[in-house]
Image: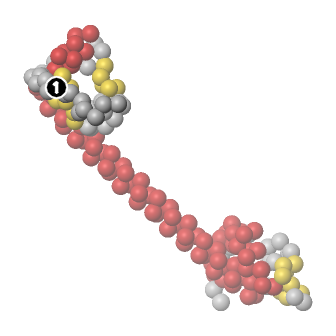
Amino acid sequence: MSDAAPTTSLIDVAATLRLLSCPVCGVTFAMPAELYLRRAADGGHIICPNGDTIIVAPDAPAELHLLNAFLLGELQAARFALDHATKKTNVAAHDAAEIRRREVRRRASNLALHSQRDGRYRICDVCQARIYFNTIDNHYEKQHADELLAMPAEQFES
């Protein structure tokens, strides 16, 4: 191994770059104009930095470039709105599930307090099973949640 530093050379190359915007992901990138023109001539495709395939068409009028930029902005706004709506839906679904869980627990506790006693056991009002007294509310929650919610709310107002 030699302790000498490697020899490097600097080559200045003037290249014209073509600025592109990916219609799929919206990333803006540049590529050599010569390569772009070759792809446009043979109807080929380009891969954007994020991996999307872009079909290259011959140069389009300026109006189409403006329309493309506008549509990309609309696409990004729609993606943002969809993401926001999805988050709100997820929060609402979580809130609804939490409300349901609390109502089942409230009704189960109420039934447990008023269930018939049989020594150390309580009798389940729904399935008539004998349940150890300190687990009857868990039995109602786990086994009979749908039945509890189907019962009239007035039944639990005491």
Q: Which residue occupies the extreme front position in the image? A: 2
User: From the viewer's perspective, is residue 26 above or below residue 98?
Assistant: above
Along the viewing direction, whichever of 13 and 51 lies nearer the viewer? 13
Q: Residue at x 16, y 25 (%)?
A: 9
Q: Residue at x 22, y 36 (%)?
A: 28
Q: Residue at x 25, y 15 (%)?
A: 39
Q: Which residue occupies the extreme top position in the image? A: 42
Q: How many marks?
A: 1
Q: Is residue 48 left or right of residue 113?
A: left
Residue where numbered disc 1 is placed: 9
Q: Residue at x 22, y 41 (%)?
A: 73
In the picture, the quarter occupied by the N terminus is top left
Neighbour tally class for label 1: few under 14, some 14-19, many 20 plus, Cα within 10 Å: few
Amino acid type assigned to the residue bearing label 1 in the image: Ser
Q: How is the image coloured?
A: secondary structure
In the picture, the quarter occupied by the C terminus is bottom right
